[in-house]
Amino acid sequence: MTDHYDVVVAGGGYVGASLALALKRADPRLTVAVVDPTPPGGGADTRASAIAAAARRLLERLGVWAEIAPHAQPIVDMIVTDSRLGDAVRPVFLTFDGTLDTGEPFAHMVPNGVMVAALLAAAGAAGVDLRLPERVVGFETCPAATTVRLGGGAVLTTGLLVAADGVRSRLRDLAGIRALRWDYGQSGIVATIGHERPHGGRAEEHFLPAGPFAVLPLADDAEGHHRSSLVWTERSDAADRLVAGDSFTFGLELERRFGRHLGPIAALTRPRAFPLGLTLARDFVRPRFALVGDAAHGIHPIAGQGLNIGFRDVAALAEVVVEARRLGLDPGGLDVLARYERWRRFDAVEMGIVTDVLNRLFSNDLGPIRVARDIGLGLVDRLGGLKRRFIREAAGIGGATPRLLRGEAI
């Protein structure tokens, strides 16, 4: 027997789970399935992400923020420095107040595992069919529907297959969508670190010759221990040596870059290194097929926007699909999906270019470039209006945003 769904989402991370939930919340009559190889409650992601104000509004509208909020840490302010490892002093060139004109924080730090678990639980309760653990191994698209083959032998049919399977998307390749790929020769080292003194909600980003070194505030754990999330960009060969080495050496290198202004520091989770690059899909849609999240665009974490542009995809695609249904149109039709692509492609490409330029500008030690960028940071710091604009953009509340990102129902 072949099961039919209006939408099948391949990928049960924060993008896939939030898309499925958004569709069911907006139109409970939609039949939606999520297919993911991770078993329920297994393979928890120990990383944390910066949730911009717009993404938080989406999570509130989906009814999951109340469960996430006790684990979330608002970012109260942020400082940016630019220096070398051997510099005795690291001057602060740029500061940001983390509060928007509305009085809400421009971002929160949220553990990925908490967020994904809340989204999947809510999706299941809303009637989404969670096929976990399972994976999509192939699909064939016909004019009327797409046939989806699962690894366990089941066959599904759907009006729309959505690939939310990450930056190395296998479904993107199966759909024949080419992607621009650029390897930076860098890796991002991530870990949760503990420190003696409270961080006060401050995020710190230190631009070093090998790349940005960011320490982002996390909520204290259940025992009241102070914690932060580390996102440390390093050349890939050096990053591999650091994460493969002993904890003592890692701790020394960590302290060398961050200092001891929060007291003694140590990694609380095993550090992991992830290769960094730029990936931009040449197309976001095909008939009855759409890319969302990292499957459509993988960018450098220098601006902390990777997760947030994924949520923008979710809000846009959900709005396009639901409105098409209300108008009696076929949500899987290329004419309908083209609206989603037009809405999201420019923003994704623009963010990819911005992060690429920023990474090239700040991941080097050339004297003239250092002087120019430090002057630029200083000027931005003195222009309050420009800083407020940057904060609004980082919060995701500028421009023509989909309804869910404004906290409105579709």
Image (cartoon, helix red, strand yellow):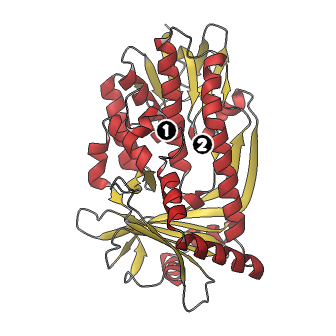
Residue 346 spot, x, y in % from top left: 67, 40
Q: Tell me where residue 235 sits by quadrant.
A: bottom right
Residue reaching furthest left? 223
What residue appears at the point 60 percent right and 89 percent down from the top-left corner? 87
Location of the C terminus (image quadrant): top left
Q: Tell me where residue 62 sits by quadrant.
A: top left
Q: Answer few, some or many: residues within 10 Å of disc 2's Cα (few below 14, many 20 plus, some between 14 and 19).
A: many
C-alpha separation, residue under disc 1 versus residue under disc 2: 9 Å
What residue appears at the point 61 percent right and 36 percent down from the top-left corner? 344
Residue at image mark 2 = 294
Q: Answer few, some or many: residues within 10 Å of disc 1's Cα (few below 14, many 20 plus, some between 14 and 19).
A: many
Q: Tag count in the figure?
A: 2
Residue at image mark 1 = 15
212 w.r.t. 137: above or below: below
Q: Secondary structure at mark 2?
A: helix
The amino acid beneath tag 2 is Asp
Residue 230 spot, x, y in % from top left: 48, 67
Q: Which mark is residue 380?
A: none
Q: Tell me where residue 186 sits by quadrant.
A: bottom right
Q: Secondary structure at mark 1?
A: helix
152 w.r.t. 167: above or below: above
Front-lying residue, 92 or 255: 92
What residue appears at the point 76 percent right and 35 percent down from the top-left corner? 178
- Evaluate whether residue 406 shows in this view: yes
292 w.r.t. 395: above or below: above
Is 218 on the left or on the right of 381, as rendered?
left
Check contact, mark 1 vs mark 2: CB within 8 A.
yes
Among numbered discs 1 and 2, the one appearing first in the sequence: 1
Is 138 on the left or on the right of 13, as rendered?
right
286 w.r.t. 392: above or below: above
Is 406 on the left or on the right of 156, as rendered?
left
The amino acid beneath tag 1 is Val
